[in-house]
Image (cartoon, rainbow, N blue to C red):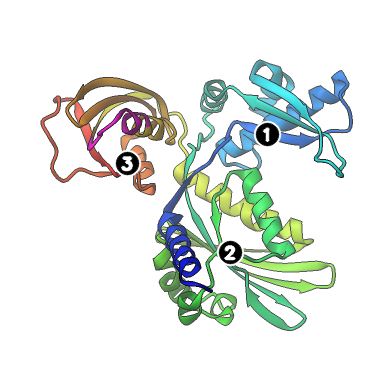
Amino acid sequence: MNRICLVAALFLALLAVRTASADEIRNLYEAEVAVTGQGSEERQLALRSAFEVVLTKVSGQGAVAAESALGEALASPDRYVQQFRYREPPAGQSGLTFWARFDSAAVNALLRSHRLPVWGAVRPATLLWLVLEERGRRRLVGANDPGAVASSITAFAERRGLPVHFPLLDLEDLRRIQPSDVWGDFRDIIQAASERYHAQVILSGALARDGDYYRARFTLQLGNDALRWESVGSLDEVIAAGLGRATDEIAQGYGQTSGGASLVTVQVRNVQSLEDYLRAMDYLDALSGVARVELVTVEADQVIYRLTLQGATHALVQAIGLGDTLVPDSEPAPVPAQAELRYRLLQ
């Protein structure tokens, strides 16, 4: 490897480590499902299926579509859809799909009206340490793993809106942790190996293949709490059981149910351009529990926004802390008396 390639590889590795703390889920209110035709009945079924996918992603709850309170909405998904179209498969492939985008404000209002969680687009990155046992051998599944296990995990995580990161499994990782550590669920070792990734959530698991079936065990470390569960089934079934339970638990911790609207003022300093202003505003607008963002004042390098919240202010602070866009301001400038939060925009 020449020097330029080496520098590029190191840069990408450092970037991957630095940005593991949180992700912004794109296309949160969009879904694509397989269809067999374009008739009106098939279209209505596809629209309902796409709506279920979106409700699941936004709420973070796998069983949200089974909520009886949502029955009327699921029966009339056209009330919430903004756009839809059919997509032809790439050349040489088969399988027509149906894509739809739904109104974010209407979806959020629907969930909150039934006191169901609304999980914003900025979500805590989940670092996944997974050891796979096949043919008597155990190995860790890493970021560049080409196997079916990694593909199944990636596909499920995308459907549920869960940002999952695999470890790099470079020399630094292999110096700190071995497959036996994850297999034995040695949480202190797993925690120590995870520090370089700055992940908010750690999920570890052991997956053993037994013919056509798998036995799986997962442990979720969410703050100071640790939850553990097991499952047996096909590969997709145990991945769905493992990551599905994890997503439900994480969304319960970071999503917000309606607690009545409240207002909070957020001062953001170090805003040096129109691009900075829009970046800060878009970031705040994507956070869990933020129903509306309004501009209050712009002066020098600071901007003051007024946020309408559906939830508690401490949950907003927690959500901001997930990312690396805003950090608490150590040198706040004078602000109006009603201001509660002061931050500085990172460049």
Residue 337 on image: x %, y %: 14, 25
Residue 41 appears left or right of 263:
right
Residue tagged by mark 2?
143
Quadrant housing the C terminus: top left
Residue at 64% across, 58% down: 242
Determine whether the residue tagged by mark 3 lies in a helix, strand or loop. helix
How far across and how far down the image is residue 96, in percent? 84, 34
Q: Secondary structure at mark 2?
A: loop
Mark with earlier residue (3, 2): 2
The CA distance from mark 3 to mark 2 is 30 Å
Q: Is residue 276 inside the magenta stretch?
A: yes
Q: Nearer the viewer, mark 3 or mark 2?
A: 2
Q: Label 2 neighbourhood size at 10 Å, few (<14), some (14-19), many (20+)? A: some
Q: Residue furthest left?
A: 334
Tag 3: amino acid: Val
Residue at image point 52% right, 30% down: 115
Q: Is residue 149 above or below residue 49?
A: below
Disc 3, disc 2: CB below 8 Å? no
Residue 198 in the figure: left or right of residue 152: left
The residue range painted magenta reads: 269-278
Q: In this orientation, which residue lies closer to the viewer: 19 or 214? A: 19
* Disc 1 residue type (three-letter): Ala
Label 1 and label 3: CA atoms lie apart by 29 Å
- Residue lying furthest top: 79
Residue designated by label 1:
31
Task: Measuring from the top left, give residue 192's x and y in whole percent.
Answer: 41, 73
Is-magenta flag for residue 293? no
Which numbered disc flags the more N-terminal residue, 1 or 2? Answer: 1
Q: Nearer the viewer, mark 1 or mark 3?
A: 1
